[in-house]
Image (cartoon, helix red, strand yellow):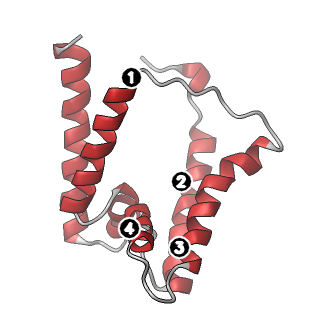
Amino acid sequence: MIDWPHFTPLASAAGGALIGLSAALFILLNGRIAGISGILGGLLAWPKGDTAWRIAFLVGLAGAPLAYALVAPLPAVQVDAGTPMLIAAGLLVGIGTRYGSGCTSGHGVCGLSRLSPRSLVATAAFMLAGFVTVFVVRHLLA
């Protein structure tokens, strides 16, 4: 069943195109992959002379919704999980990111566009894990 009021193919395609363009420009101009976990992880390690662009990237990432809020109301946020579940999910994602040597943005957007076999395997693994998790939570535990 399609949720027609929230079906936004044009806005979604435009957002995807902007993400792809941004990732392409980032690698062309900076020579680096736009993987959020790698950018944040590199900042936590405090590399010499490598912090300014990482901070700017993360500030832009967090600041974009704030800039959007200046021109339009932000959509309502609804989280159907409690704090312990969110903490557990965040820890599991962090662990998976370390084991997979990257996150969804690094592997799914940048790695697949570079035809990286490692990114194809990683993307397939986290997509499968997501499908299985949704099935278990919504159908077996509900």
Q: Secondary structure beneath disc 2?
A: helix
Mark closer to the chain start, 3 or 1: 3
Residue 103 located left or right of residue 129: right
User: Would you place residue 15 above or below residue 55 in this image?
Assistant: above
For mark 2, what is the residue? 16
Q: Position of residue 136 (x, y in %)?
A: 18, 23
Mark closer to the chain start, 4 or 1: 4
**Residue 10 position by quadrant:** top right
Task: Give the residue at x 46% y 69%.
Answer: 34
Residue type, numbered disc 4: Gly
Task: Give the residue at x 44% y 65%.
Answer: 40
Q: Badge 3 local density, few (<14 within 10 Å), some, or many (20+)? A: some
Q: CA distance from mark 2 to mark 1?
A: 30 Å
Mark closer to the chain start, 2 or 4: 2
- Viewer-side label of 2, 4: 4
Total numbered badges shown on the rendered structure: 4
Q: Which mark is residue 82?
A: 1
Residue type, numbered disc 1: Gly
Which residue reaches farthest top? 142
For mark 4, what is the residue? 41
Q: CA distance from mark 2 to mark 4?
A: 24 Å
User: Would you place residue 138 above or below residue 18 in this image?
Assistant: above
Q: Which mark is residue 54?
A: 3
Q: Nearer the viewer, residue 8 or 100?
A: 100
Q: Secondary structure beneath disc 3?
A: helix
- Viewer-side label of 2, 3: 3
Residue type, numbered disc 2: Gly
Which residue reaches farthest right? 71
Q: CA distance from mark 4 to mark 1?
A: 26 Å
Q: Position of residue 103 (x, y in %)?
A: 33, 58
